[in-house]
Amino acid sequence: MTSTTEPRDTLLDTDILPVQCPRCSEAQNTLVGTTDPFALDAKIGCMVCGYTFGPGEYRELLGKRQAAFAGLQVDLG
Ligand SMILES: [Zn+2]
């Protein structure tokens, strides 16, 4: 078996799911020090205002964001 591409690594390296900044409400994140936004030492920040997300904050906000997407159909009215 030859390993071809590694979808997970590629995905994480190029495209982290942005979450909304609690300070400025923009969803433009920076990822420093790792390519894995779920790594314990990942430093996720806001590209706009410089806010730094806490270790568990990204996961929490990501969960809320996904919940918001799931609820878009009812929110549109
Ligand atoms: Zn911000």
Image: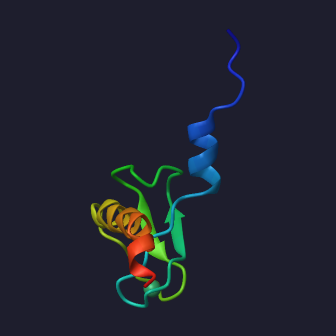
The total of numbered circles placed on residues is 0
Quadrant, the N terminus: top right
Residue 18 percent location from the top left of the image = 50, 68
Look at the image and name its color scheme.
rainbow
Ligand 1's image quarter is: bottom left
- Above or below — where is 32 with respect to 29? above
| Residue beneath the point at 29% across and 67% down | 57
- Above or below — where is 11 with respect to 62? above
| Residue beneath the point at 37% across and 89% down | 23
Residue 44 percent location from the top left of the image = 44, 67
Q: Is residue 67 left or right of residue 29?
A: left
Q: Is residue 14 left or right of residue 44?
A: right
| Residue beneath the point at 54% across and 80% down | 47
Quadrant, the C terminus: bottom left
Q: Nearer the viewer, residue 62 or 69?
A: 69
Q: Nearer the viewer, residue 70 or 2?
A: 70
- Above or below — where is 13 with respect to 63? above
| Residue beneath the point at 27% across and 61% down | 56
Residue 19 percent location from the top left of the image = 44, 71
Quarter occupied by residue 10: top right
Outermost residue on the top side: it is: 1
- Above or below — where is 11 with respect to 63? above
Q: Is residue 10 left or right of residue 62?
A: right
